[in-house]
Image (spheres, grey):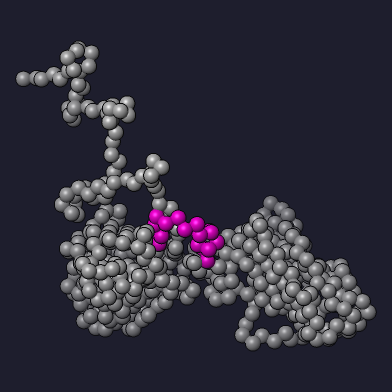
Amino acid sequence: MAVQLTDGTTANVVDATSKGILVQNPKVATQGGFVNLGAQVDAGAVLGTQTVRAVSASIDERLTAGLDTTLLIDSFNYTAQNTTNWSNNLTTMTLTYSGGYAFLNAGASVASGAFAVLKSYRTFPLFQAGGLHCEFRGYLTQAPQTNNTVYIGLGIPGTTAAPTDGIYFQFDATGILKAVVNNNGTLSTSAALTAPSANATHEFAINVTDDNSEFSIDGVLQAIVPLPTGASLMTLSASASVFVQNTNTGAVGAAQGVKIAFVALWQLDIASGKPWQHQMAGQGMVASQGQNGGSLGTTALYSNSLAPGAGAVMTNTTAALGSGLGGQFAALPTLAANTDGIVCSYQNPAPTVNLTGRMLMITGITINSVVTTVLAGNATPVVYIYSLAYGHTAVSMATAEGATAKAPRRIPLGAESFGAAAAVGTLGSSLGVRVQFGTPIPVNPGEFIALCAKNVGVVTTTGVVTFLVGFDGYWE
């Protein structure tokens, strides 16, 4: 028997479909019509019942929103370890970089006690008031193996032993995958999880808050591990490295390898206001050091105990004094007056499949100069005026603009001078030249940046001026 609901008139009839009764809330505030906003975290697959979290609103009736801060984004598309960001700790197992992956146990060791650990030098704070999101893309080369243990996550890794503190996925020595919160050795673990397929890339993600750690694989929530009973923090260390640990706790039937393609971390919910260049520097992308796939270590020409030496004659077509993003450079002030000479030159590495092309953003430059061999033959001062050249596609200042080439862009910087027959130790100026760029100077991959000096005074016959040059900047 059909039942029709009305308000007593034929004009207001309740609508229904095969899905159920259609409901429309009153639009008049005094009639109390509104909808509670919520976000579904789990449909019930993990906890057995649907998990919904309320959306928060401020006292001023505004929805609150978290603003994330980038902490680390790194892909392993290079062929040698990035020693700026990563530590490789190995016994018997090997760790190689090839085909876009960091490969732990590339040598396929099955020996008991063999291990490989990939760990970030940087540690990441686990703030009580905000979350931390960490994700890895990678896979195991075998189904989980007896006597092999793999850890993927955040914490203080071990070698043959378990991590001493941390939040991580664990493929244990019996072949079971679990989500683990380790508070100074006290473990809180999930039920056994379904291990993702071997030899296929998956996304392992961990969200850490002050009361829960959530573990997802391929975007699907797998487990929620709460704050351990009686613990003040998820991990006692309150900060953690990103790590992957592959350990044989006994002889293994088939060699287990772990391949990691990508690691990323974000600080959640806290509007830190941290400038972008600070975020880049925190990931190792400060201009003073080389990047993935290129020459690591310092980008400046400044080796340990570098002496000024006899110097060289500057030219405007070659980096005769040396190449580097700043450093120490010695010049014979004999280049013809009113001719630009290159003090130092640096090429932003051109991209390849194993070298990620990055923009080099220069935010400042510092120049100091000093006489290191007495000047002679100049009856009046040597006067250097400095300029910054950037964006050119060849080292020469004579590079012309064209369809496939770029001429240097120039910015005047300042001047220094040396009196006639200046003695050793004479400074070009008391404070040097210091320029901060309100708008960063962009240098594309493959392009050059150079400091040039032009002597608008007189040429010497002998003598050496040594320049100390520093660049401020970051990669992105």
The quarter of the displayed image where residue 3 is located: top left
* 367 or 66: nearer the viewer: 66
Identify the residue at horizontal 41%, vertical 42% (top origin).
60
- Would residue 160 appear left or right of 465 to someone viewing this image? left
Is 268 one of the magenta-colored residues?
A: yes
Percent x, y of residue 306: 66, 85
Percent x, y of residue 353: 49, 63
Q: 222 above or below 307?
A: above
* 84 or 59: nearer the viewer: 59
Identify the residue at horizontal 59%, vertical 71% (top origin).
288
Percent x, y of residue 346: 65, 69
* 111 or 386: nearer the viewer: 386
- Would residue 392 appear left or right of 3 to someone viewing this image? right
Identify the residue at horizontal 23%, vertical 62% (top origin).
225
- Tell me the magenta residue range: 265-281
**Image quarter (top left, top right, bottom left or bottom right) of the C terminus:** bottom right
- Would residue 5 appear left or right of 88 to someone viewing this image? left
The quarter of the displayed image where residue 2 is located: top left
Percent x, y of residue 236: 31, 73
